Amino acid sequence: MGRWFTALAEGCKPRGCRGDREGFRSRRSALSCTLPSRADTPAPEPDPPREAAAEQGPAGGEETAPDRCRFAPTTSGPAHPGTLLAALLCWLDARSRNAHFRLRLEDLDPSRCTPENALDMEAALAWLGIDWDAFSVQSDEAAAHASALDHLADQGLLYPCRCSRSEVKQLNLPAADGGWRYPGTCRQRELPTGGWRKCSEILRLKLPAGRVIPSDEGGIELAQAPDVQMGDPILRRRDGSIAYHLAVVVDDASQGITRVVRGADLASSSAIQYVLQDRLGVSHPVYRHHLLLLEERGTKFAKMHGAVSWRELEPLYPPPRLCGMLAHWCGLIPEPLDITPADLVSGFSWSRVRRRDLALRWTGRELELL
Ligand SMILES: [Zn+2]
């Protein structure tokens, strides 16, 4: 059994997995369907074609394994209306197709992600009426993340970078995700003797040249030449924490995730994740990117983040009221009726979900649609 497979499986051991009704055995089973077969292990059952599974919808086929979905919010701050809309759409997508639904908290940024925020996120989702079949936090998956770095280092795809964030920003090279493109300044540098574990600098992925074409179920363009449009991404930060792209790809693979439903702000990161999936030899999930809630920031609109937390909404809106507003705003119901997430499952269809972003204003007393 290969080191990569073994360590990934070890990284899946449940710890503090409140609400995980499946446990380790079935997660290992999911893992064996996701990772490439090895000569020294029995070949796993092949995955069903993803497109066919998606088309079969809620009923599915008797021989089709249910989809595995996840909602993966960061715990760098409290839940806000945009978080709740994203959770609602992701949950409805999963429940309407009888899929397995995992809540996975992205808690890898030690400077911003706190245990209090993690508990607050769970409380916010439960308040709205969202439940989950499995629960995990990314910081529990350190062994799997390290194993993936080993695998990439073995392929010569990791290098240390000494450039600071401000140095990269000063180069003024815009990236496809709205950030700054790293031009590969340190690409020729090598890992120290002893490998990446002995390196105290940032670790970046050496992206191969060329265009990749992930597909989005809703038709959003995801094709990209990430080496040109994004630049080599950080996989491990200077403080030793694992960065978003690596964590999300490894966790999706080890948890057997087949559908990734997330906000359109993450669409431009799909190409890098697609490349990582290829380099790690794991399956590509189906992607579906949805609309965002925006708020006014100065003269522009930006993804809703800081205007109002769910705790400020809690005394003003009963959960079915807020759920009804969110469902109405995104097109699922014609009027903002009081309704629960569970009431929306049977009528849920992506064809009714608005594609364009929505702008909101928090007046201090209520949420207003602009
Ligand atoms: Zn550098």
Image (cartoon, grey):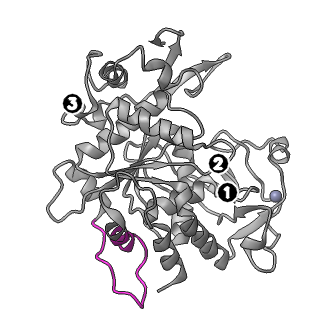
* Disc on the earlier residue, 3 or 1: 1
Residue 242 image point, x, y percent: 64, 58
Q: Is residue 122 above or below residue 363?
A: below
Q: Which mark is residue 123?
A: none
- Give the residue number, with chain letter if any, for mark 1: 241
- Place of residue 305 in the rendered image (x, y in percent of width and height, measured from the top left): 57, 28
The residue shown at (26%, 18%) is 338
Mark 2 and mark 3 lie on one chain; the one further toward the N terminus is 2
Range covered by the magenta-colored residues: 28-48
In front: 51, or 161? 161
**Amino acid on which disc 3 is placed:** Asp
Give the residue type at disc 1.
Ser
What separation in Å lies between label 3 and label 1 (alpha carbons)? 40 Å
Secondary structure character of the magenta stretch overall: loop
Question: In the image, what residue type sits under mark 2?
Answer: Asp
Front in this rendered view, residue 122 or 203: 122
Left/right of residue 81 with respect to residue 247 in the rendered view: left
- Give the number of the mark in front: 2 or 3: 2
Sort mark 3 into few (<14), some (14-19) or many (20+) by Cα contacts within 10 Å.
Answer: few
- First in residue order: circle 2 vs circle 1: 2
Where is 208 relative to 86, above or below? below
Secondary structure beneath disc 3?
helix
Q: Is the residue marked by circle 2 packed among few (<14), some (14-19), or many (20+) residues within 10 Å?
A: some
Residue located beneath label 3 in the image: 343
Asked if residue 36 lies in the magenta stretch, the reply is: yes
Residue 285 x %, y %? 41, 58
Ligand 1 located in image quadrant: bottom right
Examine the structure image and report whether residue 320 is included in the region drawn in magenta.
Answer: no
Whole-angstrom CA distance, mark 2 to mark 1, is: 7 Å
| Vertical position of residue 72 compared to residue 291: above or below | below
